[in-house]
Image (cartoon, grey):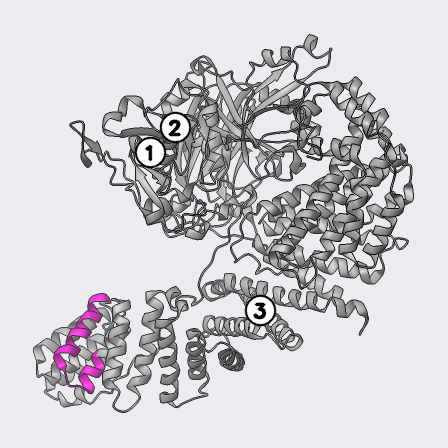
Amino acid sequence: MASSSFIINNDDEYYIRVLENNSSIPLQRTQFQSGTELFQKKQYDRAIDLLSQCLNQFQTERILLEDLDGHNSSFIQLSSSNWKQIAALVDKSSLELVAKVLITRGLCFYNSTLSSSLSESDRELKFQKAIHDFNNVCQHFKLYKKLYFAENEYEYLLYKDWEALNLFLSSMKAHFLEARCLQQMKERSPLRLSNGGDDELSSSPTLETAITCFSEAISMAKDLKQHLDIVANVNNCTATLEQLPQYFLNRGLCYNDIASYELAISDFTTLISMTEKESSSSSLTQAKKQSQLLIAYHNRGIAHASERHYNEAIEDFTIAISCFNSFTENSSEKKQNLENYVQTLNQRARILQKYIADHIFECKSSKDEKLTSKIVKYKKMACDDYDLVIKLNPSNTYPYRFNASQLLILVANSMDHFRPKQEIEESYLKAIPHLKDCISQKPSFFKLYLDLARCLQKTNQNKNSEELVNLYDKSIQLMETEIEGKWISKTQKANIYFERGVLNNKLPDKADQSISDFTKAISFNSEFTDAYFNRALIYYLKKKKFDLSMQDLRKVVEINPNDIEAHLEIVMISVELRKFEDAKKVLQTILELDPDNAIALNYMEHLRNHTESEISSRSHVMREEHAFDEDMEAQKKKKGTSDKSLKNLFKRKDSKSREEKDPSEEHEQSSNGKKLFFDPNFPPGTKSLLGTGNLAEFQLPAHIKNLETGIVWLRPHEIAGVTKPSLFVDGHDFGDVMQGALGNCWIMSGFSIVANYPHLMKKIILESKCDPSIGKYTFCFFKEGESKQVVIDDLIPCDALSRSYLFSCSRDSNELWVPLLEKAYASLYGNYYALMGGHLKDSLVDLTGGIPFTCKVSSQNIEEIWNLVCSLPKQNTDLTRCKSIKLMGARSETSASDFTGIINFHAYAIIEAIELPSHLTNGKRVRLIKMKNPWANSTEWRGDWSDSSSLWTPELRKFVGNQFNTQDGIFFMSLEYFAVQWNLIEGVEVFNPSNWSQYITRGFFDANIRSDNDWTADLLEETQFLIENPTDNNRIIISLAQFDTRYDYDKKNTDSCIAIHLLQYDKPFAGRNSSRINKIQKKSILVQNEYMEDREVVIDKVLPAGTYVAIPHEYFTTNCADAECGSYTLRIVSEKKVNIFELKP
């Protein structure tokens, strides 16, 4: 506070007196101009001192500003008449000047961060001071509007007021500059370095705040453009709007950094459009225009690549490269953009490489010549890009040479058997110098020596087996000692030892070493038949250990009974041991496998003729080749944070399937004479917390470094603050729920919503099957079209240091239903880690069995929004008396101002809609929406109708129940602000079974179809569901839910693109004997769903009487470990009875 006298005081006149005492303030324009000159001379410290002295003289404005910034309740609640008195005492031009001083001083702080002599802590302090100044500029603008413009008129009058317009422009710039500070605090360059989606990206509060500020600046700029015809100073406005492309550029960069790639693509597309439309009369030269396009296309390419839109990404990178090539040779623009050009070349090469890696095995399996030619072309493009990057950046060639070598080896290995030999050998030859150079730069990486040895063998560049063995020795030594070796699978290690064993066998006196290598290979892969076979030959030929040889060969034919070579070797050893009858039996086995096998027939003839010596003279061939099944590089998967990207958030879950059984007889030690229940399916420990996920991504308090020592599982009576544990304390409602350390707002908001309705809670928490005396609780979820009960004990994960709840809890620590329901949810999926990130609508489906819906939010559909939120049932409504109910919440992705208190990318519960009585609002219609932040703390809406808003009169507070607590996360906001602040409403509709008919079935998408050129051909191969609807105006809802990826990420790591299509049935109806449709005509399509990577998609339509066909479809075949991943659940709910027939292909 600027003055200790400004303590909260409810007397309006107090402010008037203070302002009267400070109303005569000399303006320090000369001082400001001197500070500006010092800023221009880059004498930032001197400028800061002078500008600070200047600011100290604006006492009135500083006092007002600091109270506004601090949300002083008495200040906010000043009456409108007193605002007018205050306005009369404040010099309008002084407010404008203060804003200029603040923005200039903020720029001084910002620019001084570029000094190389600053420590990191000093640099961050400078950024924070700059942010504070820019933020104060924005607050000044808010103050100015409050003083001089009525709430509903400033949008028009403001632009005609010279001082107001200047302050508006300063505020817009300040929002942008504040965002740039936040962005720079992440220490990233303007042209983002990105790996195109492999690196794990995490959400950053700093970047999300930056997005908020950029969004505010963009919103102001758009509004300004619409009013250019009335502004007081067109030239200033036009000059300021020339920076608008930078706003979109930088917001797009932030969206890329937090993995909101669709939003990033939208911003970069807008930027490209604006730049390409820029007129020749603007200040943007052709060279600057090309520079801006280069950066825009480059970063849009990164966003496309991160979404696996590889063709679009390659096209964008190619255009960016052409922008650089359009610069005049040796021009300053070409020199300035050289680094950007190098990054773009590298990005294109990497995405070309990713495309090849994703599609090259299709060439091998399908012999697609067109795709093969494309891959060969892309390989050349990528290699040329890497070569050019190496040439332009000779000081750091390792990453480019390594990537080039891996690309060349991948293509050569994959196309070895169907491309010309010369082409394959050329790829290996090109990889060799890259690998040698990499070894010189990073001699500790085992894979380089391994790849070099393999390439030399493939090209016959080194026939000296001893030198090749030395490369394998070095590779194995590093693999066993360096951290990289931990990434290698057992199969890969088996292959490496196998290859060295083959080479050692070629060297004199290395038989024992060769046997050791094959033995090591077998230890890593117990079914490695080639290793058994080769070891058998060495035992037989070099060591004369026939019994060991026979033992290995019998193991080979046990694993693979069709291995004729192994059978023949058994014959030869049997003959050597003069066990001729045994030899004949084996030969008979071979002839059963291959009746025309010439060797077996010849051996049988020799045995009949007693010329066995001819058999022993047969040569023996060591097996040297094996398939390189796996990619040697460590596989990383990206992490997203926005809803658009949540499909990639769920990493490696516990794959253990939970059976439908009651583990009722497993208990702990006794308590009060009873055995405490213990759930063996979800025991306390790391596996139940993390599964096989990544600890670095697990959202825990900073002091918890180790899951074993930092977390303790406690019974309720052992938890700090719990004195009288009970499932419920004074019933249950939305106010109970408090989110903990886990990022699962999508679930917590779901809990808040269902807690309002006893009928739903009784179905979720099965109290009749709970026994608190032994710590046993039963919960029920809705999965795959049916109820699924989960039984748990009451051991709850807690912070070992404080012994308090670690994850969610109730506002009353004694109340257990919230942490226990969260634990049951974690048990359902195998671990707590699986609960991170998700969609509110999915949790509501799991809790209620309803069908999900979404509604986009904007000011254009405000009445639709109001009608929707008004459909919420009142708290404690008897749902059995309702035909259906809708439950919902909201999420913001683009967000308005950070100063509003609304958190971006966060799920909020919608509690109820209230229209205030007009006689209490001076006849004005006021419609409010009550919401809850699952954090249940002071992070609440701060605008109109917030808890501390001056709009609340005592009568109005009484009307809504006087439920105002700035620390509970519950707040009201007007419908008009709701339409601005939120992007999406999502929820479920729950249907009363006594009023609706429901059909549920499980099926499987056809995994064998792949007609990419004609999606209708694929569609017609799926199961068709014939719907006979005998009644007009029948509302029918069709829901398609795919396999839930949270169950097992290892089997299916992302949601597939799915859709339902509804068609008019135009064939003769014959019930279950009806014919399937075999051709789709445009006129018969009623609903053609958009393909969505959602867990569940829905059609909701009122249909006339008639016959229809619903077809569920997965756009691409599912790539997963078992058939269950391709399963789906289809639900059809109808207001009036329909008949449904399943028509299989």
Contact check, label 3 and label 2, Cβ < 8 Å: no
Hey, which quadrant is residue 899 in on the image?
top right
Q: Badge 2: how crowded within 10 Å, few (<14), some, or many (20+)? A: many
Q: Residue at x 80, y 69 (%)?
A: 332
Q: Position of residue 153 (x, y in %)?
A: 82, 25
Image-based side of 713 in relation to 297, left or right = left
Under mark 2, the amino acid is: Ser
Under mark 1, the amino acid is: Ile
Q: Is residue 678 magenta?
A: no
Task: Please tell me which residue lies in front, 70 or 208.
Answer: 70
Residue at which label 1 appears: 719
Q: Which residues are magenta?
A: 536-559
Contact check, label 1 and label 2, Cβ < 8 Å: yes
Q: Is residue 556 magenta?
A: yes
Using the numbered discs, state the Cα–Cα distance from disc 1 to disc 2 in whole angstroms: 9 Å
Under mark 3, the amino acid is: Ser
- Checking the image for residue 813, the label placed there is 2
Q: Is residue 605 above or below residue 250?
A: below
Q: Secondary structure at mark 2?
A: loop
Q: Position of residue 210 (x, y in %)?
A: 66, 45
Image-based side of 313 in relation to 140, left or right = left
Using the numbered discs, state the Cα–Cα distance from disc 3 to disc 2 in whole angstroms: 66 Å
Which of label 3 and label 2 is nearer to you?
A: 2
Q: Is residue 1132 visible?
A: no
Figure quadrant of the C terminus:
top left
Q: Is residue 300 above or below residue 97?
A: below
Task: Please tell me which residue lies in front, 162 or 70.
Answer: 70
| View extreme (top): residue | 919
Q: Secondary structure at mark 3?
A: helix
Residue at which label 3 appears: 373
Q: Position of residue 672 (x, y in %)?
A: 18, 27
Q: Position of residue 492 (x, y in %)?
A: 36, 69
